[in-house]
Image (cartoon, grey):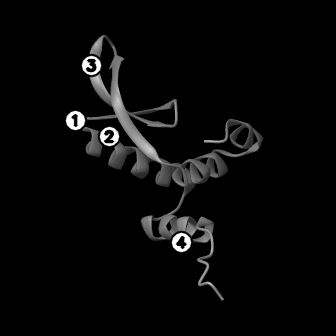
């Protein structure tokens, strides 16, 4: 995650959309003195926990989609627009 780029984004929608383009992972963390599986982007924790790594990631994606005001299909389109063009050797 490019923290400088993130800091230049203005709205919650822009920030959430940007985070959706990044790899979301999950790891064990402590919340209210309990061990939880918490989602994160890079080394930045998101305020989303789940029962498993996969559950935390799915909940984080849904939460960010809600904040960005976009659907899962729109996230896929956003991600495909960011992929570099393939070099066919031509």
Q: Is residue 61 above or below residue 7?
A: below
Residue closest to the far bottom: 90
Q: Which residue is mark 2?
A: 56
Q: Tag 2's secondary structure?
A: helix
Q: Tag 4's secondary structure?
A: helix
- Disc 1 versus disc 2: distance between alpha carbons? 7 Å
In screen coordinates, is 79 left or right of 28? Answer: right
Rendering coords of residue 44 (x, y %): 53, 31
**Quarter of the picture holding the N terminus:** top right
- Disc 2 versus disc 3: distance between alpha carbons? 13 Å
Residue drawn at point x = 48 percent, y = 52 percent: 66
Q: Earlier in the sequence, mark 2 or mark 3?
A: 3
Q: Earlier in the sequence, mark 1 or mark 4?
A: 1
Rendering coords of residue 77 (x, y %): 53, 71
Q: Which residue is mark 1?
A: 51
Rendering coords of residue 83 (x, y %): 58, 67
Q: Which residue is mark 4?
A: 77
Q: Which mark is residue 35?
A: 3
Q: Evaluate if marks 1 and 4 touch, with contact meaning CB atoms under 8 Å apart.
A: no
Q: Earlier in the sequence, mark 4 or mark 3?
A: 3
Q: Earlier in the sequence, mark 1 or mark 2?
A: 1
- Disc 4 versus disc 2: distance between alpha carbons? 23 Å
Q: Crowding near pointer 3: few (<14 within 10 Å), some, many (20+)?
A: few
Residue closest to the far right: 8
Q: Crowding near pointer 4: few (<14 within 10 Å), some, many (20+)?
A: few
Closer to us: 66 or 22 = 22
Residue drawn at point x = 62 percent, y = 75 percent: 85
**Quarter of the picture holding the C terminus:** bottom right
Q: Is residue 90 above or below residue 80?
A: below
In screen coordinates, is 4 left or right of 44? Answer: right
Q: Earlier in the sequence, mark 1 or mark 3?
A: 3
Q: Evaluate if marks 1 and 2 touch, with contact meaning CB atoms under 8 Å apart.
A: yes
């Amino acid at each position: 995650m490019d923290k400088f780029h993130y800091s230049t984004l203005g709205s919650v929608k822009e920030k959430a959309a940007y985070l959706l383009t990044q790899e979301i992972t999950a790891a064990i963390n402590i919340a209210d003195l309990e061990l939880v599986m918490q989602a994160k982007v890079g080394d930045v924790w998101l305020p989303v926990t789940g029962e498993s790594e996969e559950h935390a990631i799915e909940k984080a994606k849904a939460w960010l989609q809600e904040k960005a005001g976009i659907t899962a299909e729109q996230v896929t389109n956003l991600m495909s627009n960011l992929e570099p063009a393939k070099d066919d050797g031509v």
